[in-house]
């Protein structure tokens, strides 16, 4: 008798985890130790819940990651501009610095839309890329084409990372039905692509250097 009472307690607990509408869909099952099993439609809802929650967390964590990255760039970009020589490169870096301020503001807006406070999660990838940029400056001479091209290469790596990150978050937001979030971040994505293109154009047409004769 004691065993039966314990079983009934477990059954009640299992049922309470469902909404009233879900309980109405339950049917008995001899193959289930709890004696209850959801119908096919109810089971589909349960299977879809966990993956969706995982995608939401992934999106939110990715936004926190980018929030750290964009704020870190606001510190790094003035140093890159100071180290650069070609005026077109300096202008491009300073222009992107102003854009990055807007990128930070957009991410803050996204946090608000998601009902979250702005929070940064350290971006290991961006930290590594910025350290690489610092190394380029340390290993090249001021005012040389080598330094300018090194800065461009390091900056393009940053842009490629951000393009990939924003593209991924936009896809996640769209999948989760947050077109509003996707639309805001799409603006930033397009600006990151334009910055990368600008850097390529500067490397191709604005950096003058001569190679040593073999």
Image (cartoon, grey):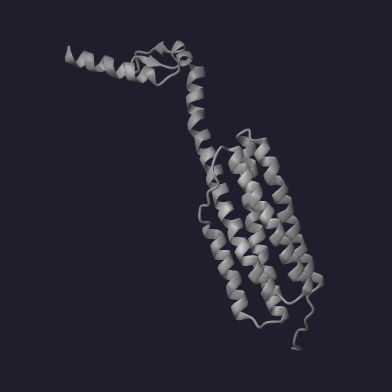
Q: Quadrant of the C terminus?
A: bottom right
Q: Position of residue 129 (x, y in %)?
A: 58, 65
Kindly give the residue lying farthest to the left in the view shown: 1
**Relative to 124, is 90 above or below?**
below
**Relative to 73, is 12 above or below?**
above
Camera-side residue of 37 and 196? 196
Q: Position of residue 152 (x, y in %)?
A: 70, 69
> Looking at the image, which residue is at 63% across and 43% down?
109
Q: Position of residue 191 (x, y in %)?
A: 73, 54
Query: Is 214 on the left or on the right of 110, as rendered?
Result: right
Q: Quadrant of the N terminus?
A: top left
**Relative to 144, is 17 above or below?**
above
> Looking at the image, which residue is at 57% across and 60% down?
126
Query: Is 22 on the left or on the right of 88, as rendered?
Result: left
Kindly give the residue lying farthest to the right in the view shown: 205
**Relative to 12, is 98 above or below?**
below
Query: Is 22 on the left or on the right of 131, as rendered?
Result: left
Q: Which image quadrant is residue 180 in?
A: top right
Query: Would residue 193 be seen by someone viewing this image from the given angle?
Result: yes
Q: Position of residue 11 (x, y in %)?
A: 32, 17
> Looking at the image, which residue is at 53% across and 49% down?
119
Camera-side residue of 198 and 209? 198
Q: Which image quadrant is residue 140 in?
A: bottom right
> Looking at the image, which residue is at 62% across and 36% down?
175
How many callouts does the rendering have?
0
Query: Would residue 33 be seen by someone viewing this image from the given angle?
Result: no
């Amino acid at each position: 008798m004691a065993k039966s009472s314990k079983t009934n307690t477990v059954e009640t607990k299992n049922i309470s985890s469902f909404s009233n509408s879900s309980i109405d869909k339950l049917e008995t099952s001899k193959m289930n130790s709890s004696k209850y099993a959801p119908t096919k439609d109810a089971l589909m809802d349960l299977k879809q819940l966990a993956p969706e929650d995982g995608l939401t967390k992934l999106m939110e964590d990715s936004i926190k990651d980018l929030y750290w990255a964009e704020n870190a760039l606001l510190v790094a970009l003035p140093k890159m501009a100071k180290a650069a020589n070609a005026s077109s490169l300096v202008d491009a870096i300073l222009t992107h610095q102003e854009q990055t301020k807007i990128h930070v503001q957009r991410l803050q807006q996204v946090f608000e839309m998601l009902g979250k406070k702005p929070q940064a999660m350290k971006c290991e990838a961006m930290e590594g890329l910025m350290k690489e940029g610092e190394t380029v400056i340390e290993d090249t001479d001021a005012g040389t084409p080598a330094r300018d091209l090194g800065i461009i290469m390091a900056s393009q790596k940053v842009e490629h990372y951000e393009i990939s990150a924003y593209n991924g978050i936009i896809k996640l937001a769209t999948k989760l039905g947050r077109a509003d979030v996707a639309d805001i971040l799409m603006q930033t994505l397009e600006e990151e692509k334009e910055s990368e293109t600008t850097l390529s154009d500067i490397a191709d047409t604005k950096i003058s250097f001569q190679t040593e004769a073999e």
